[in-house]
Image (cartoon, rainbow, N blue to C red):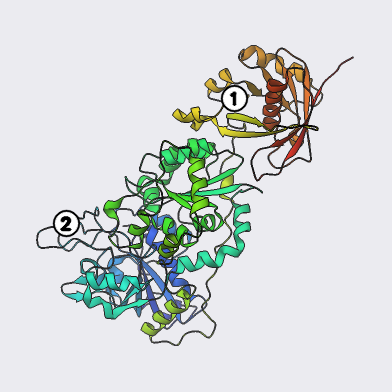
Amino acid sequence: MPVPPGQTHLAAPGGPERWRTIGATHHVLGVIHNVTSATRLLDLLSVFEGDTRIQVHFTCTGSSAFDGGMREFIAAREMPCIPWDEACELKFDLAVSSSRGGELQDISAPLICAPHGAGYNKTLSREPGAGSREPGAGSREPGAGSREPGAFGLTDEWLVHDGRLIPSAIVLSHDEQRERLRGGCPDAVPFATVVGDPCADQLRASTPFRDAYRTALGVRPGQKLLVLTSTWGRRSLLGHGGDTVRRALAELPRDEYRVVAAVHPNAWHGHGGWQVHTWLAPFVRAGLVLPVPETDTWKAALTAADAFIGDHGSVTLYGVALGLPGLLGAFDDGVVAPGSPMALLGGLLPRVTAGRPLAGQLADAVAAQPGDARLAEVGGLVTSRPMRSMALLRGLFYEHLGLPEPADPAVVRPVAVPRRPHDRRRDPAPPPVFVTAHFEEHGVGAPTVTVRHYPAAVQGAEAGHLPDPHLVAAEGEPDARWLHTADIVLARPAATGRPTREVAGPLFDRYPGCGVVAVPGPDGLNGDCGLALRDGPELTARWRDPQWWTTPQTAAATTHACLSRFGPSWEGEITVRTGEHLPPAVLTVATVRRD
């Protein structure tokens, strides 16, 4: 049982008045199925903010296979929790659930049921067993005496018990869901209310703060933010093998893209957060931002994104509703409800293919999808009451409580600025990278080169997509294969006054395949460095008007590319770019002449 042990909370209905500080007159029960439903439930219950007439309590049905993380979630938010058996014995003025799992018919209160995603898009069957109301594997094969299931939450399988409708009210986010409810549970239609989608409204309310979210997520000026979103299951983006995650980091230039992965709580807690971090650790070292799922960081990332790659999870639909261009990295038609917005979307979004560079597929989506009327129509199916959900939800809740609403309006609040999730770990040495250099044709003046970095450790079989790359690895890199094959070795910062050649000598001896050793200054100031050539002079590389990307690694890679193109005696100035929309900088390379 995921609820922390203990007796009924002191503020529960019927508890002793003498222990209470606030004299709440009405008691609301929030019903939690798992972390996924809990995050949406808290969004719904936010309509009670500031109303001291209302005491909210929580209970867990104990029916979810994905109950990992519940204790931590409840404890971190200091939620007053009542064990399920005790909650069923108490009388509440209202109960709210964002899932259909568990024995909801046992609750003694008017029950309002809402979805925990972007509407009702999945098919789920109940596990076999007397009285069980646990979501099963989603099989769409009709059993004896049954019909093919419709969308989870819109059929009598989930809404009726012993011939009686369980909820007192059913929350819908769009008018189209009423007709699907009519097909799945006709008796429930009079109890359905269309209120819109609180999450979609919050995403809309957050768009003015896009730049703040991008800064918190580590997105630099000129970078693009790509969100990878995965639901749970073997046919999700992550369950599909994770190759889309690897390809995004391997094929998209490191300086031009920031990549965030939004992983479904069921995948996260089903395997354990430690295990997910361990599986994805190579990608995190390559630059992946991996926020924990029970926060709103995924909302901030989606609001701030330039594009997404998703699957059949709700975040994909929210991305389309925001007008973001995107691709499908996976899609499980077998669990998507026929006729749902997600089913329509599965036929519209292009699938990631193995035979084409990922950057080109994203570029095609960015070029083609804005203004696509079909995608806009599907995105519009997320809510038919845009920016009205808080007001409509509050009205519905207070109507069932028999209380007048507070005088202040119900306002949709924007997403909080994330607490810089990209700072979670920082290795002491930069990871090895393959570097490509493209020189522009030039006449008079300094030449221009575009230098792009690609994390080496995630290349796999796709390294062939890089045209004539050279490898940069840092001294101290634990994977010996990179240092032994590196064209450039980046030394640890030199002590003040220590000559570059003196630092480089032992590294040349240790790594005979290395042609250049780059030695950053003591503090790495501005990304300047000294360079020693195995068969050439000692050089300095200094940045004029340094940018966020002007590192010793980039200075060394640029110098190596120029020497390869213009000859071993080249020195001078060159304009350097690391991406189409990134600010340029000028690098000055000079030979060190000693008397």
Quadrant of the rendered image containing residue 15: bottom left
Q: Could you tell whether 125 is left or right of 388 in the image?
A: left
Q: Is residue 88 above or below residue 445?
A: below
Q: Which residue is mark 1?
A: 471
Q: Position of residue 275 (x, y in %)?
A: 41, 41
Label ID, residue 438: none
Q: Position of residue 527 (x, y in %)?
A: 73, 34
Task: Give the camera-side residue of 92 and 358.
Answer: 358
Secondary structure found at label 1: strand
Label ID, residue 128: 2
Q: Could you tell whether 305 is left or right of 24 in the image?
A: right
Q: Quadrant of the C terminus?
A: top right
Label 2 close to label 1 by CB (< 8 Å): no
The crowding category of the residue bearing disc 2, from other C-alpha atoms within 10 Å (few below 14, some 14 to 19, many at least 20), is few
Sequence-wise, the earlier of marks 2 and 1 is 2
Amino acid at dot 1 = Leu
